[in-house]
Image (cartoon, rainbow, N blue to C red):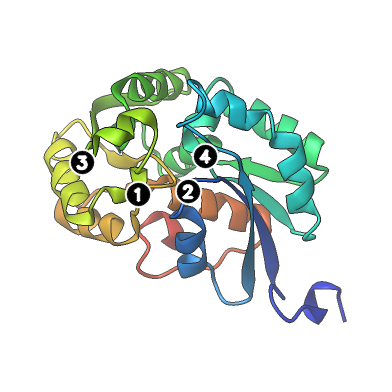
């Protein structure tokens, strides 16, 4: 009997999930979508926008400690669940660096979005986020640097606190679906990207795909897809959009 087969939980695979401490969405959606036999074990990176002017930079100072915590759960793969801090530069290089520091395969939300779009043959997208406009601009540059054109983008702001990187989780599904259909209806757009692991997207993905007949990729969905495939688990996940059927 293999070591994995002896596990009560995570018999097929364990995912170590790193999220900003304020994130209340990513781990819930991972658990909702994880195939049978796959378990999720979360470590939290201190994210304190009320204390720091540059909370993402402060959060990244804790990366080594949180990687060590995640590794202590003996996962098969670590998933770095923050899009805004991983959507920069060369995503493959960032994953390689984190994997070396962790001592086991580590995937990121930023790299997962790029990999998912490439797997589906997508090079022109509409992007919706709950971020301040400056962060959207940074992500547009990230995608452009990786061969993906952002045809249209929008910050879906329903609470002014989002401009200070708080309350991203409060974007309602109906508003996200409405705005995604509006932007994604542009004939140049091949797919819609919902960027941010702290924005609820499970129901939105399937609703938007049904309305537009185009793929919809969310940060959480793409990160789970990349983590599962990296761990050698190729199950399709029903009701989670075209990517997880891939």
Q: Tell me the quarter of the picture where residue 189 sits.
A: top left
Front tag of 3 and 4: 3
Image coordinates of residue 24 in percent, x first then y, are 45, 54
Secondary-structure class at tag 2: loop
Q: Tell me the quarter of the picture where residue 188 sits.
A: top left
Question: Which residue is more in the foreground, 129 or 158?
Answer: 158
- Residue at numbered disc 2: 23
**Rendered residue at 37%/63% (across/down):** 240
Image coordinates of residue 2 in percent, x first then y, are 86, 76
- Residue at numbered disc 4: 82
Task: Give the residue at the far front of this rendering.
Answer: 51
Mark 2 packing: few (<14 Cα in 10 Å), some, or many (20+)? many
Q: Mark 1–mark 2 contact, CB under 8 Å? A: yes
Front tag of 4 and 1: 1
Q: Mark 4–mark 1 contact, CB under 8 Å? A: no
Asked whether, in this view, residue 23 is left or right of residue 103, the answer is left
In space, the residues marked 2 and 3 are separated at their CA atoms by 17 Å
Q: Mark 2–mark 3 contact, CB under 8 Å? A: no
**Rendered residue at 73%/81% (across/down):** 8
Secondary-structure class at tag 1: helix
Q: Mark 2–mark 4 contact, CB under 8 Å? A: yes
Mark 1 packing: few (<14 Cα in 10 Å), some, or many (20+)? some
Q: Above or below — where is 22 with respect to 53?
A: below
Which numbered circle lies on residue 169?
A: 1
- Residue at numbered disc 3: 158
Question: Mark 1 or mark 3, which has the lower sequence index?
Answer: 3
Question: Mark 3 or mark 4, which has the lower sequence index?
Answer: 4
Answer whether residue 236 is visible to the viewer in this image. Answer: no
């Amino acid at each position: 009997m293999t070591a994995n087969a002896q596990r009560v939980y995570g018999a097929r695979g364990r995912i170590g999930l790193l999220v900003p401490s304020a994130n209340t969405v990513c781990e819930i959606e991972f658990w909702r979508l994880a195939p049978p036999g796959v378990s999720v074990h979360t470590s939290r990176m201190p994210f304190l926008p009320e204390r720091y002017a540059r909370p993402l930079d402060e959060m990244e100072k804790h990366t080594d400690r949180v990687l060590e915590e995640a590794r202590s759960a003996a996962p098969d793969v670590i998933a770095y669940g923050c899009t805004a801090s991983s959507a920069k530069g060369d995503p493959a290089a960032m994953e390689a660096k984190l994997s070396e520091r962790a001592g086991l395969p580590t995937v990121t939300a930023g790299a997962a979005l790029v990999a998912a779009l490439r797997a589906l043959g997508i090079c022109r997208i509409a992007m919706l986020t709950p971020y301040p406009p400056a962060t959207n601009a940074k992500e547009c540059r990230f995608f452009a640097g990786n061969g993906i054109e952002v045809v249209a983008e929008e910050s879906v702001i329903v609470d002014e606190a989002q401009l200070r990187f708080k309350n991203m989780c409060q974007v309602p599904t109906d508003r996200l679906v409405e705005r995604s259909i509006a932007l994604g209806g542009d004939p140049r757009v091949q797919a819609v990207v919902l960027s941010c692991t702290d924005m609820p997207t499970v129901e939105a993905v399937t609703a938007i795909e049904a309305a537009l007949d185009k793929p919809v990729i969310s940060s959480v969905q793409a990160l789970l897809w990349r983590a599962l495939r990296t761990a050698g688990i190729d199950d399709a996940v029903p009701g989670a959009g075209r990517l997880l059927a891939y």
